[in-house]
Amino acid sequence: MSPMSSHNPNTPVAVVTGSTSGIGLGIARKLAEHGHALVLNGLSTPMEADALCTQFMADFGVEAVFSGADLRKPEGVAELIDTATMRFGRLDVLVNNAGIQHTAPVHEFPVEKWDAILALNLSAAFHAIRLALPGMLDRGFGRIVNIASVHGLVGSAHKAAYVAAKHGIVGLSKVVALETAGLGVTCNAVCPGWVLTPLVEKQIADRAAVEGIGIEQAGRELLEEKQPSGQFVTPEQLGELVVFLASGAAAQLTGQALAVDGGWTAR
Ligand code: NAD
């Protein structure tokens, strides 16, 4: 039996990188709710990964498979895209979401952290796009969504690698959009402000420790400093935006950097 024989060939298929947690998980769940089969990815134990896939089937009745590929390496990205094509025979929606953060002044920034952040937050998206695109162009349909950040549009102190990578992915999104315009494929960057996920919880905890304040107060201060709404963006809200970008209604929406930031970049 071929490995893809039990899959309905008409079911759209999405790959969401870094989907075991936070924003990626929120996006994967929304795509599943809207009938996409999923290739999930992230740093999880095999047991956690099995439980996650089973949960997708139970919650949404869609098939989900997991790839634990380390996307800092080009071979890892190739393994992930191969998982989609081997299992499902197609890839309709690619969401490049996996990302990490490290904060330090630029002259103290650890070189290995710079390399890891550029590899995961920027180069992994390039590799995934270059590998996924030929199939999308052959079928005349594809949706590429790169989860950038407000830090793809503006800077913040102590985030040299992150801001460089996120500005890079906004630029990459524009080039891919131009190269695929009119061919059924779109490519956009989504630029969230603060979202309460493990990545930001660490920054809140660091701030609380440095300032000798409680976690709640540190979270409030973090929002007040940058995000005029005073509220966190949610993974579910970002998932709904990705579902829209994946739809036919968004066929002419391409090459954009869409800020979802409670007003952060409006001032
Ligand atoms: P998170 O820490 O909750 O999740 C990160 C995910 O990436 C996890 O699934 C993790 O397993 C996976 N991952 C980490 N290293 C990996 C590797 N080497 N290979 C494969 N997967 C790996 O983070 P999050 O806050 O949900 O962030 C997701 C994306 O959203 C990132 O690109 C981040 O820069 C971006 N973002 C986050 C915020 C925010 O406020 N949280 C704001 C703007 C943009």
Image (cartoon, rainbow, N blue to C red):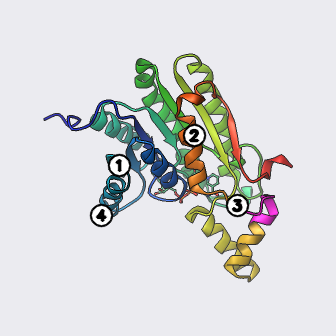
Task: Pick out the residue farthest to the right.
Answer: 267
Pointer 4 residue: 47
Answer with mark 4 or mark 3, whichever residue precedes in sequence. 4
Instruction: Find numbered disc 2 in the image and state the secondary structure of the residue it sits on.
Output: strand
Pointer 2 residue: 146
**Residue located at (48% from left, 54% from top):** 25
Instruction: Find numbered disc 3 in the image and state the secondary structure of the residue it sits on.
Output: helix
Answer with mark 4 or mark 2, whichever residue precedes in sequence. 4
Inter-mark Cα distance, 1 to 2 = 19 Å
What amino acid type should be assigned to the residue bearing mark 2?
Answer: Asn
Answer with mark 1 or mark 2, whichever residue precedes in sequence. 1
Answer with mark 1 or mark 3, whichever residue precedes in sequence. 1
76, 248: nearer the viewer: 248
What amino acid type should be assigned to the residue bearing mark 4?
Answer: Met
Q: Quadrant of ligand 1?
A: bottom right
Pointer 1 residue: 67
Pointer 3 residue: 108
Residue 96, position in %: x, y?
52, 42
